[in-house]
Amino acid sequence: MATDATPKFKNPDFRPDFHPEQLTPSTHDGLHFWQFMIAGSVAGCIEHMAMFPVDTVKTHMQALGSCPIKSVSVRQALNSILKSEGPSALYRGIAAMGLGAGPAHAVYFSVYETCKKRFSNGDPNNSLAHAASGVCATVASDAVFTPMDMVKQRLQLSNSGYKGVWDCVKRVMSEEGFGAFYASYRTTVLMNAPFTAVHFATYEAAKKGLMEVSPESVDDERWVVHATAGAASGALAAVVTTPLDVVKTQLQCQGVCGCDRFKSGSIGDVIKTILRKDGYKGLMRGWIPRMLFHAPAAAICWSTYEAGKSFFQDFNQQKDTGTVT
């Protein structure tokens, strides 16, 4: 667990006596590529599974024309879901999330760590390198996650008509073709690129700042540092990118449960439709549950990820000394 982290696990990027030459060429933070993948995969699954009900409410609010949701109020959206289908409806599509989140986050964090090491050139304060690394990570991970995210969002809508993940995949493939799984990929990347840039740059800066405030207690409260920095970065990034998230939801849910179907995947066309139906406030639909999702989700994800890194650092040290049991 994150609370068990000790000084030997401390990230060298943030030590007061850090020197670039202390980095080894073969690993970063003492970990191998596959270890970053496993830590990231576990963190991503825990994050999304824990916050899935909030994501369901957000999807209902953002899918214009989806029934029975007619209001942009979080409380009314939640009550409508519970009254129409019960609490289990909040978890509809969670299997698709599980199938996509693990592999996607494995790619996400491993690419981020690899790029951060390459771009930073040993400078732990290089926010531009952190942001650029985040963008590279999201482009790669979105290619893995987008198809299952589309399936997940369609299943989340009430009366979607799909019996499950496999039924949705088969029907979309036969009725709309393979391209439907990636109809929102361009929008997703355009949304997640700035989201991730803001997220990672803010996280690294906040983590460093928190560690410098009280360096003597960093190791005793390490999980608090990661959780706080993650929550702050997740909330900020979520609010900034909400309009593009609304566009993504529209593209992924088009033609389902009364949602508009678009002739093209043009972001401009979707935005015009949203503005015509709901005005500028339509572009911010679901920003509250989106922020409520990403703040704790990022806190869970980062603290779990850092705990996973600590575990593998300990494992590698024991292996090197021949004490692994």
Image (tube, rainbow, N blue to C red):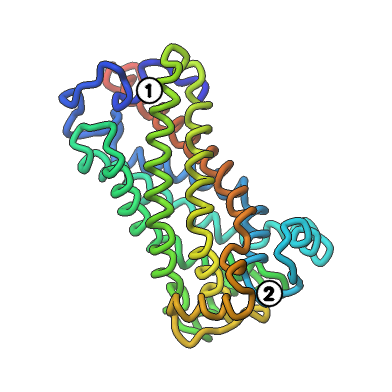
First in sequence: mark 1 vs mark 2: 2
Residue 218 drawn at (x, y percent): 45, 18
At mark 2, the secondary structure is loop
Q: Nearer the viewer, mark 1 or mark 2?
A: 2
* Crowd band around label 2 with a 10 angstrom C-alpha radius: few (<14), some (14–19), many (20+): many
Residue 322 drawn at (x, y percent): 29, 18
Q: Residue furthest front?
A: 280
Mark 2 — residue? 66
- The amino acid beneath tag 1 is Asp
Mark 1 — residue? 314
Query: Which residue does the image show at 55% across and 57% down from the upper left?
Result: 97
Q: Where 196 sits versus 71, above or below?
A: above
Query: Which residue does the image show at 18% across and 26% down from the upper left?
Result: 20
- Number of residue marks: 2
Q: Quadrant of residue 264?
A: bottom left
301 on left or right of 56: left
270 on left or right of 141: right
At mark 1, the secondary structure is helix
Q: Please say if the residues under marks 1 and 2 sit with CB atoms less than 8 Å apart.
A: no
